[in-house]
Amino acid sequence: MNDDPTLDALLATYAETPEALTAAQRARVEAALAEDDGATVAAVRALPTAGAAPDWRALEERIFAATTRAPARRRPWLYAGVALAAAAVVALALRPHAGRWSWPVVPLPSVAVAPPPAPSPVADDDPGLAIDDDPASDLDGLGPIDDALIDEVIAFDDEDDGDDELPALGATWTGWIDEFSDDELDRALAWIDAQEAG
Amino acid sequence: MDLALPAAWLRTEDAVTDEPIDVDRALVARAQRGDRAAFEQIVRRHQRGLWHLARRYLRSDADAADVTQQAFVRAYQALANFRGDASVRSWLYRIAINLSLNAVRDRAREQPSELADDALTIAATGADRLEGSQRAAALRAAIAELPPKQKLVLELRVFDELSFREVAALADCTENAAKVSFHFAVKRLRGLLGSEAIEP
């Protein structure tokens, strides 16, 4: 056994990248490895068996008893089927798009819609309309906030107690129906019946 | 030094290493087709090797028997998955090693001393036997001090008589790396024991 550190380095190279060794280096390493079957290995091999060997026949019987159920069988057709299905899915996903594929369009049935409530009158100088027309330019032209005007609007709103009792307007608010007269309501119901009749 | 070859390692019934490995593969192929007798033959051929392997890890005869049984049960359940990339023996040993490591992990709190346990099993009736058993105990202790990879390679190669190719497969390394690990293990043993301690 050689304690040459150069040999240790060669051994490490032989273990990881043997192609990096020259023929002479490889021969040297393999000669060192061949010396391993010596007295030390013989002594290890001759060590007394640890423990007492079991009754082999009894162990066999235990194993046989524990393996009475039939093992799982190989199912090559199953693997082939799964592989085929996977290939089909991949092919469908990757197929060339001659015309772009899309889901078929199903026409939706027309839905009768009740007439919307009449829009509340809006002042001509309402800045909201101007913003919708040209937001950027209108916002730029608004100028500084007039705090006095805001206070005036708040004071006016406080005086109109009736508005405070109205529910918040929402998509389902139908309070405007209450403003219909009996005659208007009859005409609206007649119109709805006519729509439903066809 | 009176270190006779252990009778258990002579393996008169399952002299696996002297037979072509194709015997095992043929048996597995038959077992995969549902041949129960073929599987039983595999058990008879390898149960001793698996028991000794597990015994080295577990240091308990009964636990080694349990692991041997579990290993064959696992192998039986996984017969369909055996494709012959490794030898049948390597496959079985791999299962047994994994089960042994799991068992060792599970009972890590107990930490029995193999040296004390095994030393007690060796009868020392005369002065020579006593000296021999002391040397054997020292050698066992030296093996136990080896780095895990070197220990595994040494034991698989010397006790289980596996080829370096099989050892490499079980140790997750190349065949060259297995040879080098074996070399360093032997070198280290000589260093730990001194040459006079192991010369016959």
Image: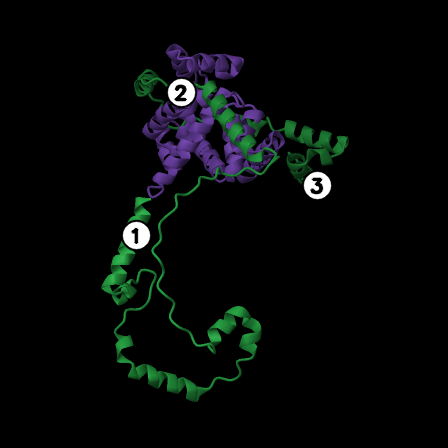
Place of residue A39 in the rendered image (x, y in percent of width and height, measured from the top left): 57, 27
Give the mark nearer the N terminus: 3 vs 1. 3
Q: For marks 3 and 1, give the one nearer the viewer.
A: 1
Q: Is residue A68 left or right of residue B7?
A: left
Residue at numbered disc 1 = A192
Q: State the residue at coordinates (46%, 36%).
A: B138
Label 1 is placed on what type of residue? Ile
Asked which colour scheme the image uses, the reply is by chain
Tell me which corner region of the image, top left, top right, bottom left or bottom right, holds residue B123. top left
Q: Residues within 10 Å of mark 3 (few under 14, many from 20)?
A: few
Specify the amino acid type for callout 2. Gln
> In the drawing, does residue A154 fall left or right of residue B156?
left
The N terminus of chain A: image quadrant: top right
Task: Quadrant for residue A10, please give it.
Answer: top right
The hue of chain A in the figure is: green
**Labels 3 and 1 within one chain:** yes
Compared to residue A183, the image places residue B99 above or below, namely above
Q: Which residue is mark 3?
A: A6
Percent coordinates x, y for residue A187 in the rendering? 28, 57
At horizontal 68% and vertical 42% (from top left) the residue drawn is A5
Q: Which residue is mark 2?
A: B47
Q: Secondary structure at mark 3?
A: helix
